[in-house]
């Protein structure tokens, strides 16, 4: 398989540091060599390629911005974003696995955990000796997680959890779940380990999207957990939303990987597919599509770079993360659909990655806040009026 050389119309390359490029290139090679050759099979069979997990851990792809004392790579946020971008060029399911482990499990333990919790869990999660998941969404509470009905009750020596979560990435394969539940009406975070009595995580089947990713229910039936499993610094829904903000940041970068895969496929196809007298790339309507794709990729690359620089300087606002997540997911989906059009009937075959990305992006546009939720977040920011309720 030919080595992927990237798409860079505005010399964005010159704005990355050597370290950032080195990290990106190593993940790019990993995806070319180890993900792309096997991903269609996993997508077809609806299985997650778990054999990639140890290699990803060895490469330092889990919790890569966290301190080295926990066995993490201590990279900056641009390097982290580039990791997400390259993984998602392989498949959104692979990026989702890494996003959940890093942004939704290691981050909350790092930000809201006790010293003991951090020392115990973070090195194991970095090495992928343990896998985590993040349970916020419930069957009746998706965009409005504040309404959650999963409850924690204080009892002697700990808590009893009752309720259910749905749509939880990695749920069935996770050793530990970061679960959000109301304790005396206040949303708190809890660590619930696989095998705890009353806790089950059945896999959800029948997805047309993110097929190479495990999605599960989490069911809590009088689950007793000891006191030390509470994340002590959680004190309301805002802490769960802080985690989502980390994950949204990674998604904004990740979907550029899908854009790159779809654009690259469409450009190469258009140059070689002859209809009537010429390659279809020589027709104005095809060129219009390719130029649109390139333009949106370039804008997303520049948005992401500034997003990362703002994050590294501590100036990033959550509304800017919403802006990037919203825009980039929407454009990635448009690009995937346009790429499918350029490939004609071949576009629906799994010989090409386009339809897989298009299907995956339907989930990516929906999770971590739907397109509409991010519109309302930005809308409130610029008008001062909340339109949620
Ligand atoms: P709903 O909230 O029911 O929304 C349905 C539609 O109504 C959407 O278009 C929405 O934008 C719109 N809508 C809702 N309210 C308004 C309003 N006020 N104004 C205008 N429009 C509105 N969750 C986790 O906790 N952990 C995970 O690991 C996780 N992984 C996921 C993996 C996959 C593959 C998928 C598909 C989802 C995952 N989710 C996860 C859940 C995801 O975050 C939710 O699906 C998402 O938040 C939307 O919730 P919902 O599906 O219940 O849609």
Image (tube, rainbow, N blue to C red):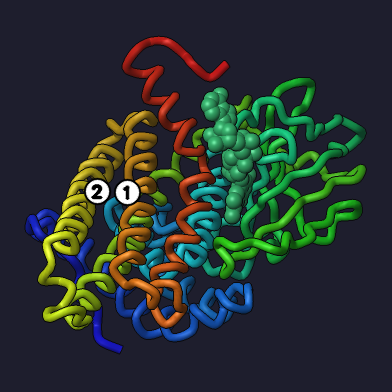
Q: Earlier in the sequence, mark 2 or mark 1?
A: 2
As drawn, is 74 to the left or to the right of 57?
left
Residue drawn at 42 percent across, 52 percent down? 66
Residue 137 lies in quadrant: top right
Question: Residue 139, labelled with which disc?
Answer: none
Is disc 1 surrounded by few (<14), some (14 to 19) or many (20+) residues within 10 Å?
many
Q: Which residue is mark 1?
A: 331
What residue sits right under mark 2 in the picture?
Answer: 300
Tell me if I can see residue 204 in this picture: yes
Q: Quadrant of the N terminus?
A: bottom left
Q: Residue farthest to the front?
A: 276
Residue situated in front as seen by the camera: 322 or 189: 322
Nearer to us of marks 2 and 1 is 1
Name above or below for residue 34 compared with residue 19.
below
Does dot 1 land on a helix, a strand or a loop?
helix
Marks 2 and 1, how far apart at CA? 9 Å
Judge whether 82 appears above or below 110 on screen: below
Q: Quadrant of ligand 1?
A: top right
> Relative to 348, is 32 above or below?
below
Between 140 and 305, the one lying in front of the other is 140
Residue in the picture at 66% in, 59% down:
215
Task: Name the residue located 53 percent from the left edge and 45 percent from the top edge.
Answer: 367
- Badge 2 element: helix
Nearest the eye: 32 or 291? 291
- Residue at horizontal 61%, vertical 27%? 237
Picture coordinates of residue 293 (x, y %)? 22, 56
């Amino acid at each position: 398989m030919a080595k992927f050389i990237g798409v860079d119309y505005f010399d964005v390359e010159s704005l990355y540091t050597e370290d950032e490029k080195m990290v990106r290139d190593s993940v790019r090679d990993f995806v070319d060599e180890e993900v792309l050759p096997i991903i269609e099979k996993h997508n077809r069979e609806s299985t997650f390629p778990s054999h990639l997990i140890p290699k990803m851990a060895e490469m330092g792809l889990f919790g890569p911005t966290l301190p080295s004392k926990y066995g993490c790579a201590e990279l900056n946020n641009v390097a982290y974003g580039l990791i997400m971008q390259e993984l998602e060029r392989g498949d959104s399911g692979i990026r989702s696995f890494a996003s959940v482990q890093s942004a939704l499990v290691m981050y909350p333990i790092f930000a809201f955990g006790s010293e003991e919790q951090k020392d115990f869990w973070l090195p194991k999660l970095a090495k992928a000796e343990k896998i985590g998941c993040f349970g916020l969404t419930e069957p009746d509470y998706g965009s409005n997680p504040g309404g959650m009905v999963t409850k924690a009750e204080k009892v002697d020596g700990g808590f009893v959890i009752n309720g259910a979560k749905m749509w939880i990435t990695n749920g069935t394969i996770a050793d530990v779940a970061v679960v959000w539940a109301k304790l005396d009406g206040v949303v708190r975070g809890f660590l619930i380990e696989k095998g705890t009595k009353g806790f089950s995580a059945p896999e959800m089947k029948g997805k047309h999207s993110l097929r190479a990713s495990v999605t599960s229910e989490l069911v809590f039936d009088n689950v007793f957990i000891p006191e030390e499993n509470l994340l002590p610094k959680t004190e309301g829904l805002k802490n769960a939303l802080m985690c989502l903000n980390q994950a949204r940041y990674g998604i904004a970068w990740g979907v550029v990987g899908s854009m790159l895969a779809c654009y690259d496929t469409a450009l190469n196809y258009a140059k070689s597919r002859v209809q009537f007298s010429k390659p279809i790339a020589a027709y104005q309507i095809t060129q219009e599509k390719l130029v649109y794709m390139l333009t949106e990729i370039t804008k997303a690359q520049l948005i992401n770079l500034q997003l990362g620089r703002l994050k590294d300087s501590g100036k990033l606002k959550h509304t800017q993360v919403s802006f990037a997540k919203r825009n980039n997911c929407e454009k990635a989906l448009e690009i995937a659909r346009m790429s499918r059009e350029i490939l004609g009937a071949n576009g629906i075959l799994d010989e090409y990655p386009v339809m897989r990305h298009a299907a995956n992006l339907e989930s990516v546009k929906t999770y971590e806040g739907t397109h509409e939720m991010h519109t309302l977040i930005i809308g409130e920011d610029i008008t001062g009026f909340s339109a949620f309720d």
